[in-house]
Amino acid sequence: IGPGLPGGMMGSLMADLESNLESINKYKAKRNLPFMTQDQLLIKLFNEVAYVWPRVGYPPLVTPFSQYVKNLAMMNVIAMEKGKERWGMIADDIWDMLLGKAGKLPGTLAPELVEKAEREGRKFFTGNPQDNYPDALDKYRKMMKENKWDLGEDDEELFEYAMHPAQYEAYKSGKAKEDFLADVEKRKAELNKSPLDDAKPKTLTVQVDGQAYRVTVAYGDIDLPADATAKVEAPVGEGQDVIAPLEGKFFLTKNAQETPVKVGDKVKKGDLLCYIEAMKTYNAIRADFDGTITAICATPGDTVSEDDVLMKIG
C-alpha cells in the first residue's frame, strides 16, 4: 500500500525479481558477502519505489510510466547493493519522461535529477509531446511489404511492428520461439538434474593476455581431456573491453532509423554503441573512451549477463 503499486506494475516487478536477484548474488558471491533472499529484495524494491515516485514528479502509474518508475527503483537497488550510487543507470526512455518529452509531469523533479540532467547536457522540453514522435507508419508499412509480411486486420500487425520493431523481427524470424523453447528446456533440465551433475566437469572459455583458451573445470579427481588447454580458433579483436552493466538482450539499434555501429568504426567517448533491453526498456551503452571498434562480441537478440564483453575498442 505504501509504494502505491498498481496490479500491472506489481506483476512486472515480480517477473523481474529472478534475474536481478541472481545478478546481485553473483556480485556478493565474488566478494564472500551473504546472499540476498527474494523476500529481502522485494521489500527493498517496495521501499525504493516509495522513494523514487515523488522524486520523479509523480508520473501516472500506468504503462509505460509505471514501468519506468519500477525500473528506476530496480536499477537503484541493484546499484546500491553493489556499492554504486543511486540514479547511476537511467534509460533514454525514462530520461524522456523526466525531461518532459512525454508531457508535463504532475509533480516537481528532484533537485539531484535536475542537476544530473544539466551535468550530462540534457535539455528539458516544454513543447507539444507529439512533436517528438513523428508518424512512422508509412516507413514500417513499406518495410513490411518488402518482407511480404501481412499488415493484419485493421493494420494491427503494422502497429505492433512500429511499436516494438526488435521484438517483432525476432518473432517473425523464429528467434523468439527458439529462445522461449531453449528457456523451457533449461528449466526442465534444472528440475530434473541430479545433485551429482554439479560435480561434473564444465568447459569454459577464458582469455589470457588477449588469447582465448578452452579450460575444463572439474570438482574432485578426474582425468582431464588432452585438449583441455586447446586454443579457441575464433579470432578476437584487440583493445579495451566494453562491459555489460546489466543483464538483458543485446541490440545494436532500437529502431529502424538508427545505423548500427560496425567493426572499424571510430568512436568518441560518450558515443552510443548499443543497447541492452531489460525490464521493457532499452538501456543505452556508450563508449567510455575514444578509439576504433575492433570486435563486436555479441549477436543482436542474444541474452547477455552483467560483466559480459559486448565489444572491444582499440
Image (cartoon, rainbow, N blue to C red):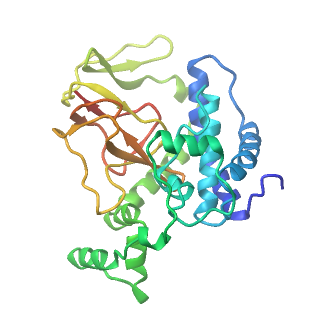
**Would you place residue 75 above or below residue 154 in this image?**
above
In which quadrant will I find the C terminus? top left
In which quadrant will I find the N terminus? bottom right
Foreground pick, 182 / 114: 114
**Would you place residue 129 above or below residue 308 in this image?**
below
Foreground pick, 237 / 46: 46
Q: At which x and y percent is residue 49?
A: 71, 48
**Would you place residue 95 above or below residue 115 in this image?**
below
Judged from this view, the residue extending furthest toward the bottom is 154
Q: At which x and y percent is residue 46?
A: 75, 47
Quadrant assignment, res 136: bottom left
Q: At which x and y percent is residue 73?
A: 65, 45
Seen in the image, is 162 located left or right of residue 65?
Answer: left
Q: Which residue is drawn at 58% across and 28% down?
A: 84
Q: At which x and y percent is residue 28?
A: 61, 24
Q: Which residue is drawn at 60% across and 61% down?
A: 65
